[in-house]
């Protein structure tokens, strides 16, 4: 019987050991959606020293950029509200604006930095992350939540993991970084990382195309390139421009002297040429690695374009519309309001500069007389419709210039005479 008891005890012990081992393995498992996170501390081991709030008070302020994006503003507001809801403490929300010698606008000792602030701690994070990556860090009395394109993700994680039990717990030295999943982990052209290229434009349409390509690069490989005027950038460059030597309806891309040229014909939109470039290079990627050598080239490709042929009917319609708009301007009614203490001055081609100009029956005549009036804000100057006035008008701030009478609007001509009159011509 003693032997059987020993065997039974040993069996039970073995079962318990196996169960505990299985539980331990499960605790250490890493889920697929967490495999791209790095963390230098253990948030679950919170201590009183990690708390940001003591006795329902906190010295911390939430700081966002003075020229914050809409996402950064929203993130700062949401974090402040989440802290208030969980702890009952309302942290100060301010911008990173600094004025030397000012007690109000100075760098604080205790700050939670949201987004791309001008603080050194935010700038340091910028150099380590790509577009949609984000990080949460604490160094002494500074806490950094940073992301170029996904600051909302950092704030969401902070709220879910660092605010609990009526307080904010974040260990000093904490660095928690989320790395986004990009289409390309590596993107090089002629051996140079894409992040080192300057993105250049030559006109407004090329500028818009540069922004589109920058958006694509940010999403696909995590690097946003600033659009720069071609004359201000040095190689290596990606240059987007029109090329008159191409068919008007085609586009291409080619390497020349270390620069990438995305070229289009005059009837091809800048975005269309960028779309062709992006589609072609994606087909060359392998295992999330995209490398283009110095001989890279996209053959000239005919693009779909939308051209409107201006036939006689089309032009006739334009002329009619132009006349309609012209008539609406010439025949529009006068609309003016006299300011407090203001006067109305009337002018007519058959008036008299000796008149006071204060009524339709006593108008003044010349623009020279207008210059001698002591006009002030609130006054109104009216020229009779259908009349021609020669000279110039120097507008006075706060004074309204309009028309009186019936018919077409008055004409003010800077020339002293009508030199189209044949009687003035000399052989």
Image (cartoon, helix red, strand yellow):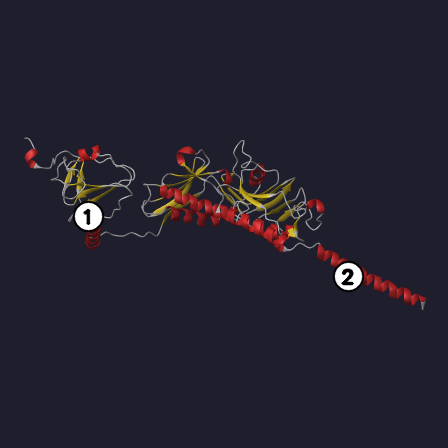
Residue 91 spot, x, y in % from top left:
59, 46
Q: Earlier in the sequence, mark 1 or mark 2?
A: 2
Residue 416 spot, x, y in % from top left:
14, 33
Q: Quarter holding the C terminus?
A: top left
Residue position marked by numbered label 2 in the rendering: 19
Q: Element under label 1?
A: helix
Q: Element under label 2?
A: helix
Q: Is residue 283 visible?
A: no
Mark-to-mark CA distance, 1 and 2? 92 Å
Q: Nearer the viewer, mark 1 or mark 2?
A: 1
Residue position marked by numbered label 1 in the rendering: 330
Residue 158 spot, x, y in % from top left:
61, 50
Between residues 308 and 144, which one lies in front from this camera angle? 144
Between residues 340 and 265, which one lies in front from this camera angle? 340
Q: Is residue 6 visible?
A: yes
Q: Quarter holding the N terminus?
A: bottom right
Kindly give the residue lying farthest to the bottom in the view shown.
1
239 with respect to 185 (left or right) = left
């Amino acid at each position: 019987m003693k032997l059987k008891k020993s065997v039974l005890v040993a069996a039970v012990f073995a079962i318990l050991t196996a169960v505990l081992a299985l539980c331990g393995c499960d605790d250490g498992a890493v889920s697929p959606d967490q495999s791209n996170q790095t963390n230098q501390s253990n948030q679950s081991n919170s201590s009183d020293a990690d708390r940001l709030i003591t006795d329902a008070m906190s010295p911390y302020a939430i700081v966002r950029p003075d020229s914050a994006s809409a996402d950064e503003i929203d993130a700062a507001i949401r974090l402040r509200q989440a802290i208030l809801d969980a702890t009952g403490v309302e942290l100060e929300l301010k911008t990173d604006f600094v004025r030397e010698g000012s007690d109000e606008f100075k760098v604080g000792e205790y700050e939670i930095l949201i987004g791309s602030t001008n603080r050194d701690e935010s700038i340091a994070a910028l150099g380590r992350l790509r577009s949609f990556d984000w990080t949460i860090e604490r160094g002494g009395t500074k806490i950094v939540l940073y992301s170029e394109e996904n600051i909302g993700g950092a704030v969401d994680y902070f709220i879910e993991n660092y605010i609990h039990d009526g307080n904010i717990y974040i260990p000093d030295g904490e660095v928690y970084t989320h790395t986004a999943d990009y289409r390309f982990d590596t993107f090089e052209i002629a051996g140079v990382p894409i992040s080192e290229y300057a993105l250049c434009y030559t006109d407004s349409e090329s500028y818009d195309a540069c922004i589109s390509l920058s958006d694509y690069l940010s999403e696909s490989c995590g690097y946003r390139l600033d659009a720069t005027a071609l004359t201000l950038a040095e190689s290596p460059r990606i240059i987007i421009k029109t090329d008159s030597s191409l068919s008007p309806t085609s586009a291409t891309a080619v390497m020349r002297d270390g620069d990438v040229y995305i070229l289009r014909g005059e009837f091809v939109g800048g975005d269309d040429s960028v779309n062709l470039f992006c589609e072609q290079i994606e087909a060359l990627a392998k295992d999330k690695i995209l490398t283009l050598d110095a001989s890279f080239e996209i053959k000239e490709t005919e693009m779909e374009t939308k051209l409107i042929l201006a036939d006689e009917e089309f032009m006739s319609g334009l002329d009619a519309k132009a006349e309609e708009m012209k008539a609406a301007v010439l025949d529009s009614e006068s609309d003016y309001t006299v300011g407090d203490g203001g006067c109305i001055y009337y002018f007519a081609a058959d008036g008299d500069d000796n008149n006071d100009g204060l009524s339709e029956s006593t108008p003044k005549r010349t623009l020279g007389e207008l210059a001698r009036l002591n006009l002030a804000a609130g006054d109104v100057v009216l020229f009779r419709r259908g009349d021609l006035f020669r000279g110039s008008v120097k507008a006075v701030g706060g004074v309204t210039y309009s028309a009186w009478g019936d018919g077409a609007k008055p004409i003010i001509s800077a020339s002293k005479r009508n030199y189209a009159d044949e009687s003035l011509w000399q052989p």
